[in-house]
Amino acid sequence: MSLASLKARIDRLPQPSYRLQVGVAIAVVATQALIAMTGAIVRVTGSGLGCPTWPECFPGSMVPVEHPEYATLNQWIEYGNRLFTGLVGLIAGAALVLAYLHRPRDRRYLRLALAMPVGVVIQAIIGGLTVRMELLWWTVAVHLLASTVMVWLATLLVHAIPRDGRPAPAGTPLLYLPTGLLVGILLTGTMVTGAGPHGGDPDTPRLDLPVETLAHLHAAMLYTFLGSLVLIGLWLRGTTNPPWRRYRVLLAVALAQGAIGLVQFWTGVPELLVSLHVLGAMCVIIATASLWCGVRRTARETQPSVAEQPQSA
C-alpha cells in the first residue's frame, strides 16, 4: 500500500467527537502529571538505580532480575515507572491521532498534539541519560523540569481543541508575571531537591549548597507568586466575563501547595509529603495554564471584530 493510498484511507475515517478529544487530552494531562509523581516515588524510595542500565533494566535483561546489590522492591519501583512511561506514550499517541482526524485541521491543535508523543520520547531519553549518569542532581532536575513543560503543553492542548467548527480563541497572553514566577518556583524547587536527602540513591552526589537557604529562596518565590495572583485578581475585576472559577482554583491549589511545603520542611522532608509536593506542583502548573487559557479566551472574546471596529474618517 502506497503512502498516498494510506493517507486517503485515513482521511476517510470519521471525525472523532469533541467529547472524545477532550477526554483523551485530559488523560494526557493526568498521565503527564502522574509520571512526575511516580518519578518522585522512585527518588524518595532510593530506587533510581534499581534498574542500573537503560533501556535494559540489567545488562541482557529488560526486566528486573535477582541481584545481590539491588533490592527486588527497588528494582520493581524503577521498572514500574518505566512501564508507566509506555502508557503515557500510548495516550499521547492517541491524542495525536485524534487531532489529525479532526476536520478542518487546526494547526495549533495539531502542533500541541504532536508535541505530546515527541515529548514522551525526549523524556525517555533524558531519563535514560539520568540513569547512565548515576542520578547526578542536575540531570534529575532537567528530567523533572521537562515534565513540567509537558504538563503545561498538555493543559494548553485541552483548551486548543476546536469546537463546533470554530478554532479555539487565542488572544494576547496577559499572565507573564505569575507564569515567570512559577518558572522561578520550579527552578528553585529542583535545587532544593538537588541539595536535599532524597537523591534516588544513597551514593548519589548532592548539590553542595545549604538546603535551608535554598528552601527559603523557594518559599520566597512562592510568596511572590501568591502576591502576583492578588494583582491578577484585582485586574480581573475590570474585565468582561473574568474566569473567576479558574482563578479561585489556582489560588486554592497554590495555597495548599505552600502548606504542604511548609509541613514538609518542618517535619524533616518525609517521603510521602515529597511525592505529594511534586504532584501539587503539577496541579499548580495545570491551574496556571488553565487560567492563562481562560484569560486569553476572555481577551479574544472581548476584542471587537473587524466589522465592529470604528472606521477612520
Image (cartoon, rainbow, N blue to C red):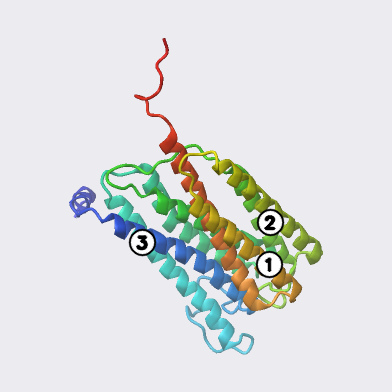
Query: Can you tell which of label 3 and label 2 is closer to the viewer?
Result: 2
Q: Residue 269's image quarter?
A: bottom right
Q: Is residue 168 left or right of residue 243?
A: left
Is disc 1 in contact with disc 2, using a CB cutoff of under 8 Å? yes
Whether residues under marks 3 and 2 lie with C-beta atoms below 8 angstroms apart, the answer is no
Quickly name the residue at label 3: 24
Neighbours of disc 2 within 10 Å: few (<14), some (14-19), many (20+) = many
Image vertical order of residue 108 relative to residue 254, above or below? above
What label does residue 222 carry, if any?
Answer: 2
Q: Helix, strand or loop at disc 1?
A: helix
Residue 71 placement, left or right of 124: right
- Disc 1: which residue: 261
Distance between the alpha carbons at the discs numbered 3 and 1: 31 Å
Disc 1 crowd, CA 10 A, few/some/many (<14, 14-19, 20+): many
Give the amino acid at mark 1: Gly
Residue located at (65% from left, 69% from top): 260
Numbered circle sitting on residue 122: none
**x 36%, y 42%: residue:** 107
Q: Amino acid at mark 3?
A: Val
Sequence-first disc among 1 and 2: 2
Of helix, strand and loop, which one carries label 3? helix
